[in-house]
Image (cartoon, grey):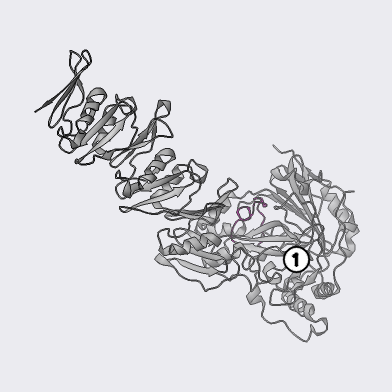
Amino acid sequence: MTDLLPARTDTPLSVRAVDKVAGLLEGDGSTRRRFLYRLAVIGSALAIDPFKFILRPTPAYASVCGSGNTCGAGWSVFCCTINNGANTCPKGSFVAGWWKVDASAFCLGSARYYIDCNRRPGSSCRCRCNTTGCDRRRVCCNVFRYGQCNTQIKGVTEVVCRLVTCTPPWQWSKACGRTVRVSESTRSHTSRCLPGQNPSHIEIKYQDMGLVGSVLGKPTTRERDGARGGRKRFYERGMILWHRDTGAREVRGAFANRYRKLKAEAGELGYPRTDRRAVGDGKGFFVRFERGTIYRAAGTGTRAVIKRADRRYRHLGGPRGALGYPTTSTRSAGGNGRVTSFQRGDIYMSPRTAPREVTDAILTAYRALGGPAGSKIGFPTHVAQLFDGGGRMQRFERGVIAGPNARRVHRVRNAIADRWRQEGANTSPWGYPIGHTEDVPGAPGWESPFQRAVVFWSKATGPRWLRGRVLRRYRNEGGPAGWLGFPVTDLQTSDAGVHSVTFQGGTIAYDPATNQETVVPH
Amino acid sequence: MRLAAHGISVDLPRGWEGTIARERDSIAGLDLRARGRALPEAAAAAVEQSRVFPVAHLATFPLPAARNDFGANAVERMGKADVFVSLLEYDPIEADSPLFEHRGLPRRLDPRRFSARQLQRTLPGQAGFQLFFNEGGRAFCLYVVLGDADDAHRLVRRVEAVLAKLRIEMRR
């Protein structure tokens, strides 16, 4: 003999009365179908008042709640009927299994899934007929289990009620498996609290989320038109939006607040492409939109990363990548450009430049110089290059930021930067920059110090480099603002070993053999 | 009559009929396709993702062609002397789960364990019984409906007669 479940004989009187009368009408089965309707009528009536069941026929509730809507028909009630409108398992029950009906008008031609909520072992419930509305089916009576969900819970308990979704149960809940069971007999079953046939996509979405039992709460508006032919509806804690390109998606809580500040679907983000999803690091969540993503994590807030910045950010790994979570939304950065700040860097972009990330010491220097608007080097055009020995360089529209290590980086502007890169950048004779390119006081040009040279630039002379005694003497003579003006040659060394530089106003030469400096005006 | 398919076989006693089948879609889905209409995209995706396992229906009365996995649309036609047996296979990854922890198809059943409450759909006079179990690395549910709860002892013997002839092969 097998170890079987105990028989259940504690069916209440009212339910037994329904069954008994149905049985008397039933006969031996040859005319059963003919009696089903009468059975339904009687069952409904008896559930309310057993003494009046013959005298009072049931209204045409079946047209609203589908066939088999009476207690005597033997089916289980829908959860929203007995759970204050919530299409969720009531307290003390669990998702125990499911079946489907294909090509359902309740799901716009897709399958409709019925998911049983069974009594959780250790909880209690009373077998009864529901007595309100037209869904007068059984509550917590049928000890039965479809068996594809929560198989870690053993045994078979009473079906408290059943949910409805148009989402496959294995997608709706990780607790459910994919083994298909079908029951065409329930095709028309429904309840007044569920969407009717040919519902809107938003109604289906809300139903599958649990109706008033969902995280969205109750509706606060009617469904209405959205931008570009879409639809939307607002709820206590969020909204559902539908567009033919994206399907129906929910946006809620802080995500909804941020989304609405950005003009929701009519703004830059467009319609949501996903519901809220976990990043997968245990810290944050995101909602993907047509043209960007909103991210949220503790400590960084709810931030929108828009358009190309988001594509670049995701290319870099998103929140789990090098940049971490966004700490600002994408915002204006001057010059029609935009910037988004993250925990470990910024992404800049402009109409002229692709989105590029700036991080570490280069970002610190770039920000200190005023970023795209104040730094005089514009937006980044390339990602940072790392060199052997810890040096680094990042190219911008009008210069570079570079340095020998992560602590010391400096701005080099325009033609000086181009010349430095031509000279070999980190391998150039100049070495790395050790200060920013700055305007020369009193002269229309720039000066830029490197480890082994100083470079002077003017529009007329271009970038020219000096060092050593010639440089010292040049400064003593007043530098670019003095009578010599800007250098017109680089430091040159003759075959005899004499160093010399020609300037706009003269020449400086230094002979190491004699330790003699000579300054000759033109 | 002998039925054998999908690793399940049974020698049906006289007066029994049955099927062992694995349907890709429900009848409605097949009807839709037969009428030349494609399933909606989401529905087609769901069909592709779902897993369909065999279902054996054994009964002492004529089984209608259109019936549901747990016998709905068939059990309504039972007489008081009839029994209906459904053996449903599940995803074998569930075979080790607590729900399917019972080992082996039961060959003997206790009539006292049958109840009018243990039915997918309560129908007057009927009694049912359900057991999830594993056998040969496979996961199953045995679901039995008796036409007359008051005649459980006699009807259970009829069910046991067919269970004795039912074989489940090891999972390949």
Q: Is residue A361 left or right of residue B107?
A: left
Q: Is residue A479 above or below residue B30?
A: above
Q: Position of residue A464 (x, y in %)?
A: 21, 30
Q: Which quarter shows the C terminus of chain A?
A: top left
Q: Which stretch appears magenta?
A: A166-183
Provide the residue designation for mark 1: B76
Amino acid under disc 1: Glu
Residue at the image position 86 percent from the left and 63 percent from the top: B149
- In the rendered image, residue A171 lying in the magenta stretch gets the answer yes
Q: Which of these two is toward me, A90 or A150?
A: A90
Q: Is residue A443 left or right of residue A409?
A: left
Q: Position of residue A73 (x, y in %)?
A: 74, 71
- Chain under disc 1: B
Q: Position of residue A271 (x, y in %)?
A: 45, 60
- In the rendered image, residue A501 lying in the magenta stretch gets the answer no
Question: Is any atom of residue B37 visible in this view?
Answer: yes
